[in-house]
Image: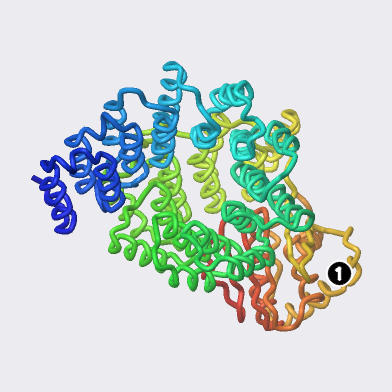
Amino acid sequence: MIKSSPLLQSLLASRDDVSHNPEVNHNCRSKEQECLHLLKRCKNIEEFKQVHAKFIKLSLFSSSPFSASSVLSTCAHSGWENSMNYAASIFREIDDPCTFDYNTMIRGYVNATSFEEALCVYNEMIQEGIEPDNFTYPFLLKACTRLKSLPEGKQIHGHVFKLGFDADVFVQNSLINMYGRCGEMTLSSTVFDKIESKTAASWSSMVSARAGVGMWSDCLMLFREMCRETGLKAEESGMVSALSACANTGALDLGMSIHGYLLRNISELNIAVQTSLVDMYSKCGCLDKALHIFRKMESRNSLTYSAMISGLALHGEGEAALRMFSEMIKEGIESDHVVYVSVLNACSHSGLVKEGRRVFEEMLREGKVEPTVEHYGCLVDLLGRDGLLEEALETIQNMPIEQTDVVWRSFLSSCRVHQNVELGKVAARELIKLSSHNPGDYLVISNMYAQAQMWEDVARVRTEMANKGLKQTPGFSIVEVKGKTHRFVSQDRFHPQCKEIYKMLHQMEWQLKFEGYTPDVTQILLNVDEEEKRERLKGHSQKVALAFALLYTPPGSIIRIARNLRMCSDCHTYTKKISMIYEREIVVRDRNRFHLFKGGTCSCKDYW
């Protein structure tokens, strides 16, 4: 027999003693109240089962619907291991489950991330003729949201309308989120517009819906509108979404403002908010702040560790990321799919081939995480960056899962970097088979041929691109000065301060010459003469953004630049020397990693 706590054993024993007393047997209400009191004191599933048995022994479970519902609710909402399996057995023992009982099961399954089971319970509820209420739908719609089940969500919306719950603000907010996260932004906005008295939760639902599908700019626009025009204070879920948007757009100032607001208005930040702050500071180039928040957290989960490991990977701190991974294992937190992707990326960004292989092999050996194309993509990238192209190709060919454009794209990029045209042709052929409408793929192929001065092949690829109507996304660099974002493209002549910027660029070039800088014209992949290549190289967007920042930011302050395309080696060398000449720290986000330039060196150690 399973032993419960001494206190609970004594309480249960006392109930057995009095249960044979005729006077107590007449006082059913008293017995029920005492059993309900015991129910509230249960700390685990074992204690709960003994109290459940007491309810059955005293016939309270069958005679009192309130007691039966209380027993079910306690188990379903407890969060104990396997509690929903036991709750399902309790539910089946209730003769006539009411709306509350069905709601309890739906909510329990959603909280346990068993979303399909929640929909099945609702289906049974309708078939049994039990009428839902306004508490049924928020959790049910959350299940549809997580499953991306738009058809089911629309059917449930129809039920909501038919039963007259379409004016309930909690149901409306759930509909906004469901439609938004399923990609139906028009329907999401329609529901939002129909709400007469919008609450902070309504706005937070709109913000979260945009964040859920990566519409980061729209997400921040809505968040600012809510703060500016309504005076409402966003809920924590809205704050988390806004922080995610800041992380993905590099909006550090707004992210810091949200952090300040949270500290002023919320006494204790929950783990989701703290994890979002770690992610935001990491992705905005403030690794020290991210580490500071991480170390101060009282409890951490796999998502927290994944955010921190990803942050270290972004900043080229591969060895620190591996130490963080080991720390997570020692704390007893199990690795999941996302954590392994983060660790493998960290190894890839830092050239830790041996360590990356070991982590991948451990994942396969333990068997707790099924390797996906993302994991194989990381391994191919790890090998490719180090020039192990034959091994990378062999990895792709021997993958036990279907090859996708992700792994071939990574392999093609490595072939271009290491100027292996023959293997690059293999990658290009397979990639075009799988994804023939991605302009970025054609540009990498074209650049690979251009590096090898195979101009006829360059022309062929460019012509094919034009025939398919594919357009190149222009490279750009963004810098924030005095709270305003400035975007520059290559050879940019449209900025109001254009004249001053190019004077500054000319001045920077003179100083660079004294430091031994020579333009690397091999980075201009066009069939033009050397002079034109040098002119084109001068106007790269990162250099223009850097000149502007040097002109309009205080001496000694950190310059932060974000790019949408990979930095060329000439811009990398150029920025290292500028950081030394002007004694400035320069942080550049190069798509999926950071470079910290300081005193003539870069944090990537010239490996990126």
Residue 453 visible: no
Q: In the displayed structure, does residue 57 sit left or right of residue 437?
A: left
Residue at screen point 41% across, 36% down:
104
Residue labelled with disc 1: 502
Residue 338 x/y as whole percent: 43, 49
Residue 203 x/y as whole percent: 68, 47
Looking at this view, is 147 or 103 the one in front?
103
- Asked where in the image residue 69 lies, by quadrant, the reply is top left
Q: Residue furthest left?
A: 1
Residue 253 visible: yes
Q: Relative to residue 77, is residue 317 depicted above or below? A: below
Q: In the displayed structure, does residue 503 sit left or right of residue 241?
A: right
- Asked where in the image residue 371 lies, by quadrant, the reply is top left
Residue at screen point 77% across, 62% down:
485
The amino acid pointed to by label 1 is Tyr
Looking at this view, is 172 or 244 the one in front?
172
Residue 561 x/y as whole percent: 69, 65
Residue at screen point 64% across, 67% down:
261
Residue 527 x/y as whole percent: 75, 49
- Quadrant, the C terminus: bottom right
Looking at this view, is 91 or 70 the one in front?
70
Q: Relative to residue 410, is residue 182 depicted above or below? A: above
Q: Residue furthest front?
A: 23
Tag 1 secondary structure = helix
Residue at screen point 12% across, 50% down:
13
